[in-house]
Image (cartoon, rainbow, N blue to C red):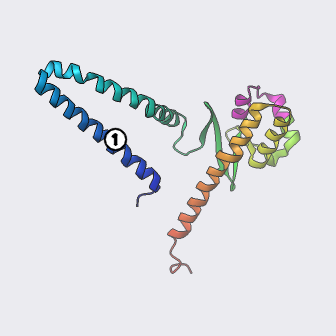
Amino acid sequence: MNSDFPSEREARSNRILSAVAAILFYAIAYAIARFAYGPTLGFVICTPILGVYLAWFLIHRAGSGFFFLKWMTLRKSNGRLHAFGDRPVRIEQHDGQCRVAARDLFDVLGESFDTQAIRRLRLSWGQAAFCRDERGQWWFEETAVLQWLARRAEGRNRTAQQLLWWLEREAFPALHRKREARFAAATSARDPTTTT
């Protein structure tokens, strides 16, 4: 079953058709130039056509290749590493909620994550909202990180505001949708006739 959306399939077929059309156009132009001027001069005459197509390709397609390479670099196989701008931010699901690595947030904000900051956060948020995992990493629970960033954004911290919007509008909803899709797939895979 193909999981692509119709718009993605249409865009892919348009890209393929435009590449085939460009190749055919160049082949016909080269055949005419070769017949009229010979193979070497025919190639020299048709070289600007290749240059125009290469420039178009770099303008329209190379940017997406850059973002694809960036995504490949920052992603992990378990899908826990995300990127805010060009900074990695670890986000993972834990007990049905998202949690964010505190050190990554402090790195994005350009602040030091030291024992004094940890002590302040533990006093402010408690063990449930600001916790340490078995590997020694500190994590903000979903509601706590949103409230913490909202407080910082009130102080005219533009990066905190952008980070808040990114978590609230992009990162967390995407992870929740992924979790709901996994749950729906798991429940639909179960056969209700075999349950006792």
Q: Quadrant of the N terminus?
A: bottom left
Q: Position of residue 129 (x, y in %)?
A: 80, 47
Q: Amino acid at mark 1?
A: Ser
Q: Residue at x 80, y 49 (%)?
A: 128
Relative horizontal placement of residue 90, taking residue 141 as reference (left or right): left
Res. 24 image quadrant: top left
Label 1 crowd (10 A; few <14 / some 14-19 / many >=20): few
Task: Name above or below for residue 31 compared with residue 190.
Answer: above
**Quadrant housing residue 108:** top right
| Magenta run includes residue 48 | no
Q: Please name the residue that numbered disc 1 is placed on.
A: 18
Q: Position of residue 35 (x, y in %)?
A: 11, 27
Q: Is residue 112 on the magenta stretch?
A: yes
- Asked which quadrant contains residue 20, the reply is top left
72 and 157: which one is in front? 157
What's drawn in magenta, residue-wise?
103-119
Write the residue at 30% across / 26% down. 50
Residue 4 visible to an observer of this rendering: no
Of residue 118 and residue 183, the one placed in the foreground of this image is: 183
* Side (left or right) of 172 relative to 32: right
Q: Which secondary structure is most common in the magenta stretch? A: helix
Assign a secondary structure to mark 1. Answer: helix
